[in-house]
Image (spheres, rainbow, N blue to C red):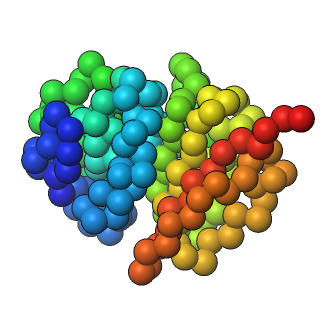
């Protein structure tokens, strides 16, 4: 796995050993960042269920002001720490160790982009989105991006004041782009 573009491009990143994480493939990551790239400069980026930290570090490479990475798995945390050292982004990449759902409340700011790739089929994305909204961690024009199994339903979003702006389907998973409903 590597950083695809930006000032850190071509740097190789470590990935956690074992089956506890599912790194986003370079092809899917490239598609995602082609969509986000025009809006990344100077943004605040949050990467939930970070795994290797590759998505947050890619955002920094492409101009994000900072990226907060939340992860609880010990081998993934060690991997993220190594990747932050390798990319020399310790002034912009902030690792938060612990459970995503409990750590959302203590985040120091609102975010322009919130990316999550939780374990599939546990409805963790729903719980995380609920916490993001309850603790007001998404900027008004902010975007939540969820990487999910193709069968994951998002029919609850309206009850949180959110809607699906865009959906990008791949062979085995999808990206859902979520925004706040405009208040009338």
Position of residue 180 in the picture relative to residue 50 (left or right): right
How far across and how far down the image is residue 176, in percent? 57, 60
Residue 174 seen in this snapshot = yes
How far across and how far down the image is residue 113, in percent? 50, 38
How far across and how far down the image is residue 10, in percent? 10, 47
Residue at 60%, 78% in the rendered image: 151
Which quadrant is home to the N terminus? bottom left
Position of residue 52 in the picture relative to residue 178 (left or right): left
Relative height, residue 147 to residue 41 (above, below): below
Residue 74 seen in this snapshot = no
Position of residue 56 in the picture relative to residue 105 (left or right): left
Q: Quadrant of residue 111?
A: top right
Residue at 53%, 56% in the rendered image: 146
Position of residue 1 in the picture relative to residue 169 (left or right): left
Q: Quadrant of residue 171?
A: bottom left
126 and 142: which one is in front?
Answer: 142
* Residue at the outermost bottom position: 171
11 and 166: which one is in front?
Answer: 166
Which quadrant is home to the C terminus? top right
* Residue at the outermost right position: 184
Residue at 20%, 45% in the rendered image: 5
How far across and how far down the image is residue 88, in percent? 15, 27
* Residue at the outermost front position: 38
Residue at 59%, 36% in the rendered image: 142
């Amino acid at each position: 796995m590597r950083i695809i573009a930006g000032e850190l491009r071509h740097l190789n990143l470590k990935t956690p050993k074992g089956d506890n994480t599912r790194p986003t493939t370079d092809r899917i990551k490239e598609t995602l960042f082609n969509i986000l790239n025009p809006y990344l400069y100077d943004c605040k980026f949050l990467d939930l269920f970070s795994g290797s930290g590759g998505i947050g570090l890619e955002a920094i490479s492409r101009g994000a002001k900072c990226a907060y990475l939340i992860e609880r798995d010990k081998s993934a945390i060690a991997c993220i720490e190594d990747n932050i050292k390798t990319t020399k982004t310790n002034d912009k990449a902030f690792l938060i160790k612990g459970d995503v759902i409990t750590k959302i409340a203590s985040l120091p700011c609102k975010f322009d982009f919130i990316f999550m790739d939780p374990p599939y089929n546990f409805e963790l994305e729903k719980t995380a989105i609920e916490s993001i909204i309850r603790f007001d961690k998404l900027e008004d024009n902010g975007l939540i991006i969820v990487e999910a199994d193709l069968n994951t339903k998002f029919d609850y979003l309206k009850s949180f004041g959110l809607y699906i702006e865009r959906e990008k389907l791949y062979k085995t998973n999808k990206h859902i782009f979520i925004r706040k409903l405009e208040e009338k």
